[in-house]
Image (spheres, grey):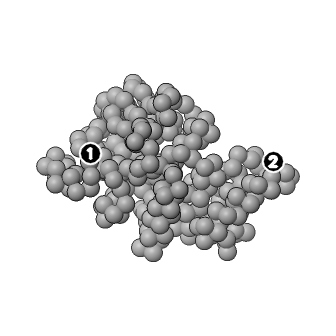
Amino acid sequence: MSVLLEVEDLTKRFGGVTAVDGCSFTVDEGTVTALIGPNGSGKTTVFNLVTGCLPADSGAVRFSGREVTGMSPGRLYQRGLSRTFQQARVFPELTVLENLVVAGGWSFAGLFRQRVSRADRVRAAELLDEFRLDRVGDLLAAELSWGQRKLLEFAALLMSDPRLVLLDEPTAGVNPILIETMEAHIRARHAAGTTFLVVEHDMQFVMRLCDPVIVFDRGCPIASGTPEHVQSDPRVLDAYLGE
């Protein structure tokens, strides 16, 4: 199994606070890897560093064997690395279908001139059907429920057929039925060859879905392994009990 993402000695400080402290880990291709840890342990900051949303103070990020440290989110998206956010980011003033078409790389001007290719429209329609959003395809994204917005954000990033998807709290604020739906979509995409790195607080979700699991505390990994292994690791128990 080859390494798809390599994080080496990443460090990020905010004033006098070190949010990420010499962080190193890898994500193997073909896995659903979890990144867990107590609140404030640096998980989302690492996501922001890896995806170019924040500049690192030091360290390196390599994707598919090439250094991408500091590369913009747009360029990473084009290379096959995409992410979601804790607060779903969609274009509320566009319809659900238009959100997907824009995610395919079309500008707003091109969208409204109806110059979008038939292939992209077919691809968007397929994703709407897959995520059961076809019935709301003509609604503005602003009219969707919280859970539907999270599904739309997930569907939109798949327009680029990414190799690696970073999911930041995919089940946060989502009802149990939609959690099952989200899990089913991740499993289906994983079976089709997509690799995932998931930050998540729902431990039942993580233990069902993810292997390996990387545990963060105070800005760096303290343990990694199978779900069963990390659940019994004294360092992990101490990190959570001490939260």
Question: How far from the left and from the top, in percent, is residue 200?
Answer: 37, 56
Q: Are marks 1 and 2 in contact (CB under 8 Å)?
A: no
Specify which label sits upstream in the sequence, 1 or 2: 2
Question: How far from the left and from the top, in percent, is residue 91?
Answer: 65, 55
- 142 versus 168 height, above or below: below
The residue located at (37%, 29%) in the rendering is 8
Badge 2: residue crowd in 10 Å (few <14, some 14–19, many ≥20): few
Q: Quadrant of the N terminus?
A: top left
The mark found on residue 109 in the picture is: 2
The residue located at (50%, 45%) in the rendering is 164
For badge 1, the amino acid type reads Ser
Q: CA distance from mark 1 to mark 2?
A: 46 Å
Residue 223 visible, this orientation: yes
Question: How far from the left and from the top, in percent, is residue 175?
Answer: 44, 72
For badge 2, the amino acid type reads Ala
Badge 1: residue crowd in 10 Å (few <14, some 14–19, many ≥20): many
Report the residue marked by disc 1: 224
**In the image, farthest residue toward the top:** 58
- 55 versus 221 height, above or below: above
The residue nearer to you, when weighing 214 against 144, is 214
The residue located at (48%, 69%) in the rendering is 181
Horizontally, is 154 left or right of 122 in the view? left
Q: In which quarter of the view is residue 7 placed?
A: top left
The residue nearer to you, when weighing 145 against 6, is 6
